[in-house]
Amino acid sequence: MAARSSRLSLALLLVLGAAGLCAAKEYDFFYLVVQWPGSYCDTKQSCCYPKSGKPAADFVIHGLWPNYIDGSYPLNCDPDSEFDPSKVSDLLSSLRAHWPTLACPANDGVSFWRHQWDKYGTCAAGVVDEHDYFQAALRLRDQLSVLSALTAAGVNPDGGYYTLGQIKDAIQQRTGFEPYVECNRDKSGNSQLYQVSFCVDPAGDRLMECPVLPHGKACGSRIKFPAFLLLIFSPS
Ligand code: 5GP
Ligand code: 5GP
C-alpha cells in the first residue's frame, strides 16, 4: 500500500514537473512587427490591395512572434489548432483595417491571418488564445502610433530621406521604447523604411525593452520613407 502510494506521488510529481517545465519553456516575449505598406508595395515584387480596398496610409501589422531570450524562436507549434475566423468575428473589421494583406493575388486577408496564427500564434496558445492573440496585436499597434511618432519629429512619408538615428529617436521619444528598424529596397535599389519591431511581454499586455534585438535587413545611411500611393496598375 505504502509502495503504491509513493509510486503515485512520484508519478504526480513527474506530471506536475513536466507541466511546470512546459509552461516555463513556452516563450519569453513577443516581437510585434509592423510594416509600412508604401515600402511593401514600392519594390520590384509590387503588391495587391486586399479585397476590402486600399488600406489607410499607416503602419499595419505583420505579426506577433513568440521568441526566446537567447534569440531563437518556436514555430508551427500545434497543427491541430487551426485558425478559426469565427473566433475573431468581432475583430474582423479592425483586422481588415490594421492587419491587411498586401500580397498578390488580392484576397480578404484570411490566409495571411491563418499563416500568422499557424506559424507563430500556435506557439503562444498556452498563454493567449486565438482571440486574445489577435486582439493584443491590434491594441499594441494602436498604442504605438508609429506614424504619428515619426511625423511629429518631421519624418514624413513623402519620398524624402532620413537617417536611422532620426527614425529611431523619433519612435523612441514618443513610444518610450527602442524599436528595431528594418529596411528593404525600392525598384531602383534605394534603402527604404520597411518594418519596425517592438518587444511585448508574454501575456501580450505590455511593451517592454527588447531582451535581444531581432535579425533583419540592414538599413543604408540614407533611408527613404516613401508615400503609400494608389496603384495605377494592380498585378492581381
Ligand atoms: P512570415 O515571414 O510572416 O512568416 O511570412 C510572411 C508570409 O505572409 C509570406 O508568404 C507573404 O507572402 C505572406 N503575406 C501575405 N500578406 C503579407 C503582407 O501584407 N506582408 C507580408 N510581409 N507578408 C505577407
Ligand atoms: P549600435 O550597437 O551602435 O547601436 O549599432 C550597431 C550597428 O547596428 C550599426 O551599424 C547600426 O547602424 C545598426 N543598428 C542599430 N540599430 C539598428 C536598427 O534598428 N536597425 C538596423 N537595421 N540597424 C541597426
Image: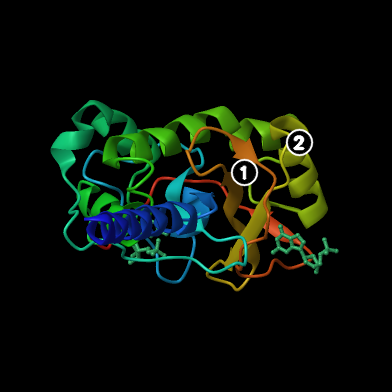
State left or right for residue 166 relative to residue 38.
Answer: right
Looking at the image, do the residues carrying marks 1 and 2 touch, with CB atoms under 8 Å apart?
Answer: no
Q: What residue did someone put label 2 on?
A: 154
User: In this view of the protein, which residue sits in the foreground, 143 or 182?
Assistant: 143
Q: Where does the N terminus fall, quadrant-wise?
A: bottom left
- In screen coordinates, is 89 left or right of 73? left
Q: Mark 1: is the Cβ under 8 angstroms from ligand 1?
A: no
Q: Quadrant of the C terminus?
A: bottom left
Task: Kindly state the secondary structure of the residue where label 1 is placed.
Answer: loop
Instruction: Name the quadrant where ligand 2 sits.
Output: bottom right
Q: Residue at x 55, y 46 (%)?
A: 227
Place of residue 162 in the rendered image (x, y in percent of width and height, measured from the top left): 76, 52
Amino acid marked by disc 1: Pro
In the displayed structure, 122 sits above or below 150; it is: below
Taking the spot 61% from the left edge, 60% from the top edge, the residue there is: 69
Cα distance between the residues tagged 1 and 2: 10 Å
Q: Is mark 2 within 8 Å of ligand 2?
A: no
Q: Which residue is mark 1?
A: 157
In the picture shown, does residue 8 fall above or below 86?
A: below
From the top left corner, tell me how far across and down residue 146 is, in percent. 61, 37
Looking at the picture, the colour scheme in use is rainbow
* Residue 50 appears anywhere in the view: yes
Residue 90, position as x, y percentages in the image: 23, 26
Mark 2 is surrounded, within 10 Å at the Cα level, by few (under 14), some (14 to 19) or many (20 or more) other residues, namely few
Q: Secondary structure at mark 2?
A: loop
Q: Amino acid at mark 2?
A: Gly
**x 49%, y 46%: residue:** 228
Q: Position of residue 130 (x, y in %)?
A: 28, 41
The residue at the point 27 percent across, 56 percent down is 2
